[in-house]
Image (cartoon, rainbow, N blue to C red):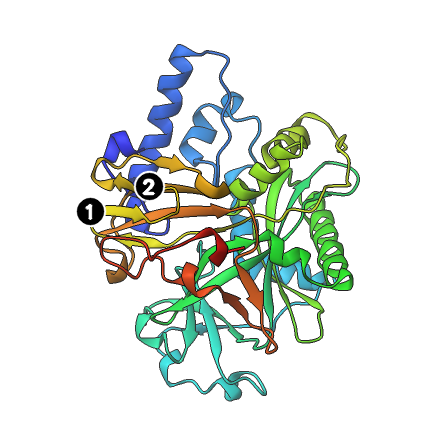
Amino acid sequence: MEELTGKRLNHNNKQNTEALSEFFVCSIEQVAALHPKARFVFYGRPEPAAFSAMPHRLPYNISPALFDTCNDKERFRRIVRENGLSTLPDKILPGDALPMMVASACFSGARQLVAQDRVGFGGHQTFLLPRGAHQLDPQAHYLVSPFLEQSVPVNIHISVFAKGDALVFPGSVQLVEEVDGRLLYMGGDYGLYQGLTAAEREGCRQMALRCGAILQNLGYRGVAGIDLLLNAGGDPIFLELNPRFQSSTAALNHALARSGRPMVLDAHLEAFRTDRCQFSSDVPPVNESFFAPLLFGDEAVLDLPDGDMSYDVDDARSSAFSPCGMAAHVFGPTAYPLTERESGSTLARIHFPDSIAAIDTGRRVRVQPAIQGFGRHKTEFANLRRDQVS
């Protein structure tokens, strides 16, 4: 991708759709010419042109049509609601009416609203109202729900098979930050999820299993991510389904590999090869976490006890290191930034062996201040030392 464009294409920007399609089809053809037996797995939506032209090379992917059904927030929320799962109340409302909307007039007792595109990734099209009203497209329609205060956002990976229960992986608490009225996904904390009560974790697991059964009936196979909210009483509420691998998959895979357990990709492939899961459902706890800030300037510098390590981001290549058990990956500059804030920015991903956040008495997730400083500086990370994140 980076060799083709010189930059990291932003999947959230529809301006990249044609370039992404061309890239995927050309890349598959080039690799297949050298390796006739090669088969391909898409991270997200299977490219329709590739799926139509060479389905024999994509045996481990659901169809684009099924992906679209599950990826539509309003449609899939309606499906799970019809199957008896608890969801947030919602309405479809026009963007031009929302800036003047009073939250309590939409939903009794609500003080703020959340407006979302029916399709989106990472919160880039999720707006907290009224503060994010200026970001809305007046010509668009949004899925609108009350903002649930005193709640903990959770994500759980599952792998769905043709028969039997889905394989449920350990969950993570999502690290979400409001930036200029958008609720952006900034990372995940598996260790913090382990700190939830046993009843809360079991409630999340049961909802994940029920979502797996719904997907199974739709003909779905393989990996999916389930976003939930734990309300003030610790009860899970379904938010949305991500019919794909997650931003948090890498941290989960790393922990599973260290324990000698099958990774998420293994379970995904297995779902297309066998009717029932052959892996043990007793997946060990995971304590890792990661944070994915935007960096600004020509270099990203990490000041650690082992010394500074600089990354020249101009060449759009990824670099990695792991002092003190941490690992960071810096990716190329963003092409077609979705917001002004992303202009001139670089995406980074920093992995930690332990939790980096806490849940306060108001049921709000708080990332440690040393971690939150990332991305605020023009040319470097905030100073970070191991004892600040233990």
Left/right of residue 178 with respect to residue 137 in the rendered view:
right
Quadrant, the N terminus: top left
* The image quarter in which residue 268 lies: top right
Q: Which residue is mark 2?
A: 331
Q: Is residue 267 above or below residue 380?
A: above
Left/right of residue 45 with respect to residue 210 in the rendered view:
left
Q: Is residue 115 above or below residue 384?
A: below
Q: Is residue 185 above or below residue 139?
A: above
Distance between the alpha carbons at the discs numbered 2 and 1: 12 Å
Q: Which residue is mark 1?
A: 298
Which disc is residue 74 wearing? none
SS for tag 2?
strand
Foreground of the two, 332 or 57 = 332
Quadrant, the C terminus: bottom right
Of the residues tagged 2 and 1, which is closer to the observer? 1
Q: Is residue 151 above or below residue 3?
A: below
Foreground of the two, 16 or 355 = 355
The mark total stands at 2
- Horizontal and vertical percent position of residue 153: 58, 63
- Horizontal and vertical percent position of residue 50: 43, 29
